[in-house]
Image (spheres, rainbow, N blue to C red):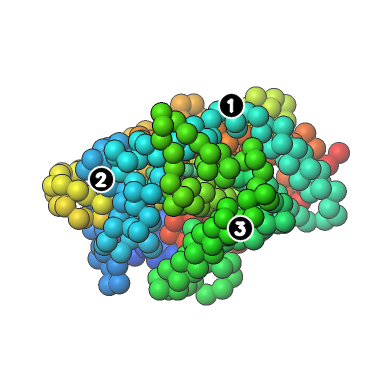
């Protein structure tokens, strides 16, 4: 069950640039119609880490190998998360949410936050929501197959699935969920929607800031003004109430970690499903093969996460002199770990540019590795498995009518529109 990366993407593959070192890897335009895999592959062959200057933001070293990526993500004492975690948000100063928001916090404070947030999002809690998530998946799949003619998979399936799930998990009212998802999307992508001209860094920063501030205000208002509207069993209430070994989250920590959950869980899952549907539609026989045995779905999901890694990079800031891949790094240097590149490293993955839905082993880093390993991985896998299972049950074959409309972003591998024909019996 394989397909080359280019097969389902007729005409989309960019040629290898004559000089890969001059490509601006922070420019969203370089990520459409496809992320710059050929540039990353060329950089992987060069000695040392590639350095890129930026006129209006700190320059950065690019990490493109799987082993270097693992080193950076595990060595949290040398590579800090507190100075921003994306290319667009990194300013060369500590992030104001550092020490409070789990993703932007180093040890030892990270361990405390992680213990408390994990105690609120236990596997048992996620397990208890399984019927709710499966119910969302079944209703969405049923409504999609009932549509006449082409279906925009983003509107019908991939956007509502995480929106409903995150809404249920957080325990926020149904009527607020669309608004919250839109704020989270703005915050993480820094763009309004696809189709518009590619925004500048200043515009992206403004858009992200608006999204973050609006989300923060939303949680302040509901927690302080209307707590009765929150589901007592949801994550917002659980974060407010959690107490472990006499420790509780402060009100700022509750707010910022609600934000982290909303932002972390929406665009990532949405785009993993959208890319996955598109790749499956381009892989002859794959849908039928999966229909024959739904136990094949989990391996397929891991391959989707590897092949179209939803969060394409992470930023770390060097805290003490070190050497990585032969390059000397000094305190304060910005390091950009390209998860999408690590997930196509031929030293780890056989035929990395082939989409193999039965790939085994599949040591992808889409959820990262080390102390910041994604807290929503179990939930994301459950959402994806539920939705694909419900679709496989109802849809005989899948046809993509055109290439997806991609959102220009250097961070989120985003799809804003995907027209499919869902053929039923
Ligand atoms: C396919 C879906 C997802 C992907 C690809 C993904 C990816 C990631 C990545 C790459 C990180 C590491 C960030 C870093 O090290 O700086 C992360 C952390 C995190 N994710 Fe996810 N995520 C997904 C879904 C979710 C969901 C559904 C939730 C929650 C509802 C979630 C919540 C979090 C949280 C809270 C962290 C911070 C963990 C920490 O810093 O200790 N994620 N995720």
Residue position marked by numbered label 2 in the rendering: 79
Q: Secondary structure at mark 3?
A: helix
Image position of 278 (left or right of 199):
right
Mark positioned earlier in the residue sequence (1 or 2): 2
The disc label shown at residue 225, or none: 3
Q: Residues within 10 Å of mark 1 (few under 14, many from 20)?
A: few
CA gap between label 1 and label 3 equals 30 Å
Q: Residues within 10 Å of mark 3 (few under 14, many from 20)?
A: few
The disc label shown at residue 144, or none: none
Mark positioned earlier in the residue sequence (2 or 3): 2
Residue at 53% from the left image edge and 39% from the top image edge: 241
Question: Residue 128 falls in which quadrant of the image?
Answer: top right
- Tags 1 and 2 touching, CB below 8 Å: no
Mark positioned earlier in the residue sequence (1 or 3): 1
Q: Residues within 10 Å of mark 2 (few under 14, many from 20)?
A: many
- Mark 1 against mark 3, which lies toward the viewer? 3
Please state the horizontal and vertical placement of residue 78, each as a whole percent of the image.
21, 43
Image position of 308 (left or right of 167):
left
Front position in the image: 203 or 99? 99
Residue at 30% from the left image edge and 43% from the top image edge: 106
Please state the horizontal and vertical placement of residue 275, each as a whole percent of the image.
58, 48
Q: Secondary structure at mark 1?
A: helix
The residue at label 3 has a CB less than 8 Å from ligand 1: no
CA gap between label 1 and label 2 equals 32 Å
Against 82, is 360 above or below? above
Residue position marked by numbered label 1 in the rendering: 124
């Amino acid at each position: 069950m394989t397909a080359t990366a280019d097969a389902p993407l007729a005409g989309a593959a960019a040629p290898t640039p004559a000089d890969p070192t001059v490509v601006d890897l922070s420019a969203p335009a370089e990520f459409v119609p496809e992320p710059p895999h050929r540039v990353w592959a060329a950089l992987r062959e060069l000695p040392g880490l590639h350095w890129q200057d930026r006129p209006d933001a700190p320059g950065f070293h690019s990490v493109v190998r799987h082993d270097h990526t693992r080193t950076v993500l595990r060595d949290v004492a040398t590579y800090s998360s507190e100075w921003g975690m994306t290319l667009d948000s990194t300013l060369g100063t500590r992030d104001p949410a550092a020490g409070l928001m789990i993703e932007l916090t180093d040890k030892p404070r990270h361990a405390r936050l992680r213990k408390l947030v994990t105690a609120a999002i236990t596997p048992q809690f996620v397990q208890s929501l399984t019927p709710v998530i499966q119910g969302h998946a079944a209703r969405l799949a049923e409504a999609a197959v009932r549509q006449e003619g082409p279906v925009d998979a983003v509107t019908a399936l991939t956007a509502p699935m995480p929106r409903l799930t995150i809404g249920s998990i957080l325990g926020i009212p149904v009527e607020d969920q669309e608004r919250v998802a839109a704020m989270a999307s703005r915050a993480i992508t820094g763009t309004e929607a696809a189709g518009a001209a590619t925004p500048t860094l200043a515009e992206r920063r403004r858009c992200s800031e608006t999204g973050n501030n609006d989300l923060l205000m939303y949680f302040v208002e509901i927690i302080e003004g209307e707590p009765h509207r929150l589901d007592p069993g949801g994550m917002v209430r659980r974060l407010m109430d959690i107490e472990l070994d006499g420790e509780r989250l402060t009100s700022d920590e509750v707010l910022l970690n609600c934000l982290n959950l909303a932002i972390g869980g929406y665009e990532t899952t949405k785009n993993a499903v959208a890319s996955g549907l598109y790749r499956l539609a381009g892989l002859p026989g794959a849908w039928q093969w999966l229909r024959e045995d739904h136990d094949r779905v989990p391996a397929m999901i891991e391959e989707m996460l590897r092949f179209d890694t939803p969060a394409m990079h992470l930023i770390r800031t060097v805290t003490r002199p070190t050497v990585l891949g032969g390059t000397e790094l000094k305190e304060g240097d910005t390091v950009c770990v390209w998860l999408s590149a690590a997930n196509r490293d031929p030293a780890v993955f056989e035929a990395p540019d082939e989409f193999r839905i039965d790939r085994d082993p599949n040591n992808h880093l889409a959820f990262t590795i080390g102390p910041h390993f994604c807290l929503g991985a179990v939930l994301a896998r459950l959402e994806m498995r539920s939705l694909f299972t419900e679709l496989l049950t109802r849809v005989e074959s899948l046809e993509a009518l055109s290439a997806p409309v991609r959102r220009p972003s250097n961070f989120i591998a985003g799809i804003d529109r995907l027209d499919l024909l869902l053929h039923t019996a």
